[in-house]
């Protein structure tokens, strides 16, 4: 259910316009469109996609990119209005209506997830996916946005959320300004969007339709205010690490810094067995630890989500035929099979508590009998850490059910091996 009055704005349009934060928001300039094969738009209700991203959809249509619209709820009247609205936007979209219950998606989440997984089963890094912002304080928006977000974490597709009701219930302090992108609509795109919104006559409040939830003030703001998209929190981290690896090559000086080289030697020397059959390294970065591990493993899978890191690591271990480097966002995605050794070094503090718990569970599930898990993390703190290295190790000890067989602690880092 909506936890705000849809007909009463907390912050006036004038107050939104005066926010100084608008000046620092990057724009969606359309240069990305050349790399897209498909745009998929998820809506909790027919009209969400038009209110939240109608201008961008009009621009997408102008570039000839195929659009697929998936609507979770709504009857035939609203779906017909949606088709009319898409026609106004110039979007020859395929519309799929799931027919789930309006206002009750949280209790139909299994069916919803199955539909979303089916739609996204073939997605690639040439897909752009739009979905309602989970923070929009509407239960259906939250449920759908979270389902899409969780599924896409295991892929390389681009996900952007669109807010609908934020401008109604929110204040400037509620806006995740650092994750916003301005679609930078032209005057023509705004006019097209306004015409499309007007097609949802069943939802527009008027003297003849007093039960309509879209007030004239809300519609005016939706049609004329900046159309913004919100990057997922995990995609901001992805962009950060991608940028680091592209700009700096060796972001943490692991090739040259004595602290890093010594820690790497201690890491490999701490492994209880001389050789391992199949190993997994999470967060391989540029592949220096990968190369050291390769000398002790018959097969090694190294993963990282930064494409630049994967490219550099692949070059670094090109002479090791038994090593594969894969682009993967853990814990949502995970390599198949069992592993005799799993190495997690300088990674856990970038994972939120629930992500780290899922990673621990995944490690336990894929660890072969008599296998080892090695953790090594810096004990300092940083603004971009979701948790400290100490906390990550404590959580692993408490949750994994494994036994510590090696422990090495220095003022700067903690290294542990479990079996």
Image (spheres, grey):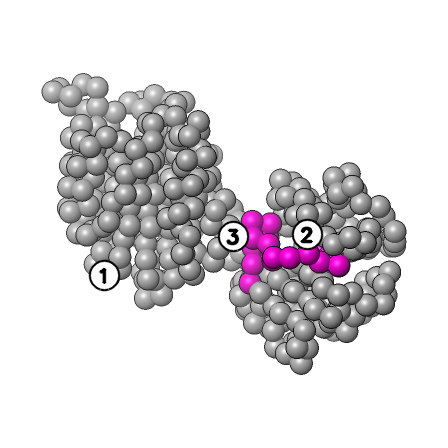
Residue 96 belongs to the span the image colors magenta? no
**Badge 3: few (under 14), some or many (20 or more) residues near its Cα, within 10 Å?**
some
Q: Are marks 1 and 3 in contact (CB under 8 Å)?
A: no
Residue 265 visible in image = yes
Residue 129 versus residue 318 in the image, above or below: above
Are dots 2 and 1 in contact, CB under 8 Å?
Answer: no
Residue plotted at (64% across, 57% down): 337
Location of residue 277 (image quadrant): bottom right
Position of 231 with respect to 210 (left or right) is: right
What residue sits 42% from the left and 60% below the top? 124
Task: From the viewer's side, name the closer residue of 106 and 62.
Answer: 106
Q: Which mark is first along the chain, 1 or 2?
A: 1
Whether residue 162 is situated above or below residue 202 in the rendered picture: below
Please say if 261 is above or below 152. below
Determine the residue positioned at 23% across, 30% down.
Answer: 75
Nearest the viewer among 219 and 151 is 151
* Residue nearer the viewer, 104 or 240: 104
227 to the left or right of 122: left
Crowding at mark 2 (Cα within 10 Å: few <14, some 14-19, many 20+): some
Mark in the foreground, 1 or 3: 3
Q: Which mark is residue 366?
A: 2
Q: Is residue 49 left or right of residue 405?
A: left
Give the mark nearer the N terminus: 2 vs 3: 3
Q: CA distance from mark 2 to mark 3?
A: 17 Å
Closest to the observer, 346 or 282:
282
Q: Nearer the viewer, mark 2 or mark 1?
A: 2
For marks 1 and 3 on the same chain, the one whose residue lies earlier in the sequence: 1
The label shown at residue 154 is: 3
- Over which residues does the magenta segment extend? 327-345
Mark number displayed over residue 64:
1
**Identity of the residue furthest to the bottom in this view:** 319
């Amino acid at each position: 259910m909506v936890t705000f009055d849809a007909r009463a704005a907390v912050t006036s349009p004038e107050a939104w316009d005066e926010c100084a934060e608008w000046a620092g928001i990057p724009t969606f300039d359309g240069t990305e469109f050349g790399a897209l094969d498909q745009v998929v738009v998820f809506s909790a209700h027919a009209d969400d996609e038009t209110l939240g991203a109608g201008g961008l959809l009009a621009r997408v249509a102008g570039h000839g990119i195929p659009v697929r619209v998936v609507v979770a709820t709504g009857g035939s009247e609203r779906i017909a209005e949606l088709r009319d609205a898409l026609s106004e936007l110039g979007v020859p979209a395929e519309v799929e209506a799931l027919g789930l219950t309006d206002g009750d998606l949280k209790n139909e989440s299994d069916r919803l997830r199955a539909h979303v997984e089916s739609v996204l089963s073939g997605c690639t890094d040439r897909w752009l996916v739009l979905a309602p912002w989970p923070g929009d304080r509407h239960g259906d928006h939250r449920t759908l946005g979270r389902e899409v977000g969780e599924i896409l974490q295991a892929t390389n597709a681009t996900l952007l959320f669109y807010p609908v009701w934020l401008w109604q219930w929110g204040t400037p302090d509620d806006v995740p300004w650092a994750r916003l992108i301005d679609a930078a609509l032209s005057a023509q795109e705004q006019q097209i969007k306004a015409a499309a919104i007007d097609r949802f006559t069943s939802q527009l409040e008027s003297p003849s339709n007093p039960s309509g939830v879209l007030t004239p003030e809300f519609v005016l703001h939706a049609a004329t205010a900046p159309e913004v998209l919100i990057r997922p929190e995990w995609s901001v981290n992805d962009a950060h690490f991608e940028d680091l690896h592209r700009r700096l090559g060796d972001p943490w000086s692991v090739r040259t810094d004595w602290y890093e080289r010594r820690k790497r030697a201690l890491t490999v020397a701490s492994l209880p067995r001389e050789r391992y059959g199949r190993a997994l390294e999470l967060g391989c970065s540029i592949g220096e630890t990968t190369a050291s591990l390769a000398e002790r493993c018959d097969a090694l899978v190294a993963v990282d989500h930064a494409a630049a890191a994967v490219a550099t690591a692949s070059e670094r271990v090109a002479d090791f035929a038994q090593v594969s480097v894969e682009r993967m966002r853990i814990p949502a995605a995970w390599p198949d099979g069992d592993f005799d050794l799993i190495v997690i070094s300088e990674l856990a503090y970038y994972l939120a508590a629930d992500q780290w718990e899922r990673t621990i569970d995944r490690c336990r599930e894929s660890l072969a009998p008599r296998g080892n898990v090695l953790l090594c993390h810096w004990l300092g703190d940083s603004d971009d850490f979701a948790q400290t290295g100490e906390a990550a190790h404590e959580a692993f000890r408490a949750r994994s059910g494994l036994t510590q067989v090696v422990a090495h602690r220095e003022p700067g880092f903690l290294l542990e091996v479990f079996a």
